[in-house]
Amino acid sequence: MEEKTTKIVNEEGGLNFVEQEIKNDLEQGKNGGRLNTRFPPEPNGYLHIGHAKAIIMDFGAAEKFGGTCNLRFDDTNPMKEDTEYVDSIMRDIKWLGFDWGDRLYYASDYFPKLYDFALRLIKEGKAYVDEQTSEEIAAQKGTPTEPGTNSPYRDRPVEENLDLFQRMNAGEFEEGSMVLRAKIDMANSNMHFRDPIIYRIIKTPHWRTGDTWKVYPMYDFAHGQSDFFEGVTHSICTLEFVPHRPLYEYFVKELADESYCPRQIEFNRLNLTYTVMSKRKLLQLVKEGLVNGWDDPRMPTICGLRRRGFTPSAVRDFVDRIGYTKYEALNHIELLEHSVREDLNKTATRVSAVVNPVKLIITNYPEGKEETIMMDNNPENLDEGKHPMPFSRELWIEREDFMENPPKKFFRLSPDKEVRLKGAYIIKCTGVKKNDDGEIEEIYAEYDPETKSGMPGSDRKVKGTLHWVSVPTAVDVEVRDYDRLFSVENPSAEEGDFRDLLNPDSLKIRKGVKLEPWAAEHAKPEDHFQFTRLGYYTVDPDSKENHLVFNKTIGLKDTWAKEQKKA
């Protein structure tokens, strides 16, 4: 099913359904009329655009209703976590335009409270130590249509459970030999209620707490309680947690009272065509060297999108357009590209670059002469001014902009045809020079000195306009052309190895691209430019003083807008 890509809002006040639920709770005075959301990432990987949708909801809802939003790292599995991921997550959130202020928390902050809560459940006969293997536990849980069977350890005496659990945390037992399970209902229709595991043994030192703990809480046990300890009022998450909600509420209500209780609300995940969102698969791509790190511009990671040249405002606009619903959908990557293109069209500085150069010689232009052409920085916003661009007898133009035997409606340069050089003069092709292989080495033309743009007499019309760069002052740069990482629309739905679906042409590196000198002088990492007639490009952090690298962010052709006009 594909989600409509118009903005999905509630009729009342332009709110999506999650915001409407929050508004209703506030109006009813729940939790004292207080709003506190949270964004709870696991520090076991880099965030992707799906997480951006959650961030925008969590922080955005808090902003909209005058509440607060916590950043809480769910650091309950030291085997997979790293401070590298913590740092990257904080960078990504700030890049998107949000800040948690003094509300930075970790699930590990609550390990003592969670451990004490587990001891309380054991003492109340609501939890027990199980020595079955993970396979045995899975087998005796039953199926959605058949009840499970009780563990042989389910009725252990309280004292024995307390002793074993404390010894588990003391490190006396091996990983996988014992778990602590909540004693709920092995016949419950919700499989999550069938005596879920709430603690397991992990002997890997924790990056924050060291060797203090040998047992660590499971997500379903730690998450709701951490929300409660922090004072979170609305735990907003994605639809896969709908079956977990009753268990969330079960544990929370063991702690909460009528004055305050967190509430879980779910919305649909962000699924994108030609993309995978699985952390496991993204990690596999990185570890196997199939991409150049987490911030590879082909990756859907936030740092990858940033490096490619996507902007925070474009990502937020895209999320706003697709909205939040209660059903899963596959969103078109073309809409994301449309949002990026619209944003960069307003902000990117226009410059001239020639990707596939061939030399154009204006034979009647004086040798040794150079003049300055003033070019608009952005025709969408003339207040941004102009910049100088040198013009000379020898220019670089795109090889594709010339044809000896052109078809009809080819409005670029060909023998005896006229075109305008952007911002400069009208020229007419007079001939070409070829090498021994028949390839064109030079194109010859004459210019009309009375047709300089902006001067009297320059209003003579021709159908074609070419961009160009002066040969003596051109700067050689590297351009990395990025395309979609996968060659099929929905790689997650395909059978077989997802790596076989990778697009072999997702990266093409072009060296010797000719760039005008003003752009080369002013370009800094993450600056956005529109290469005239070619697309939007962003300066890559790999750039050095004498070696500029540009990433192709997006082309000029807006397929999404075109399709919407047809519709």
Image (cartoon, helix red, strand yellow):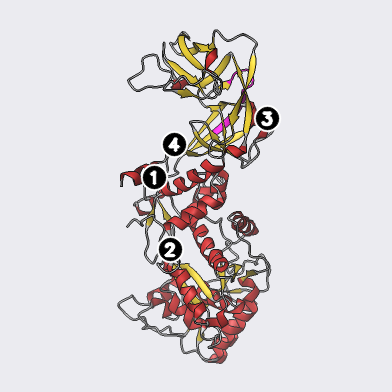
Q: On the image, numbered disc 2 is attached to which residue?
A: 324
The spot of residue 147 in percent (x, y) is: 34, 81
The spot of residue 251 in percent (x, y) is: 51, 82
Can residue 177 be seen in the rendering of this structure? no
With respect to residue 329, does 134 lie above or below?
A: below
Q: Which numbered circle lies on residue 560?
A: 1
Provide the secondary structure element on which disc 3 rests.
loop
Choose the circle earlier in sequence order: 2 or 1.
2
Q: On the image, numbered disc 3 is attached to which residue?
A: 546
Q: On the image, numbered disc 4 is attached to which residue?
A: 505
Name of the residue lying farthest toward the front: 456
| Range covered by the magenta-colored residues | 470-479
Discs 3/1, front: 1
Choose the circle earlier in sequence order: 4 or 1.
4
Labelled pair 3, 4 in contact (Cβ < 8 Å): no
With respect to residue 99, does 195 lie above or below?
A: below
Labelled pair 2, 4 in contact (Cβ < 8 Å): no
Classed neighbour count for the residue bearing mark 1: other residues with Cα under 10 Å, few (<14), some (14–19), many (≥20): some
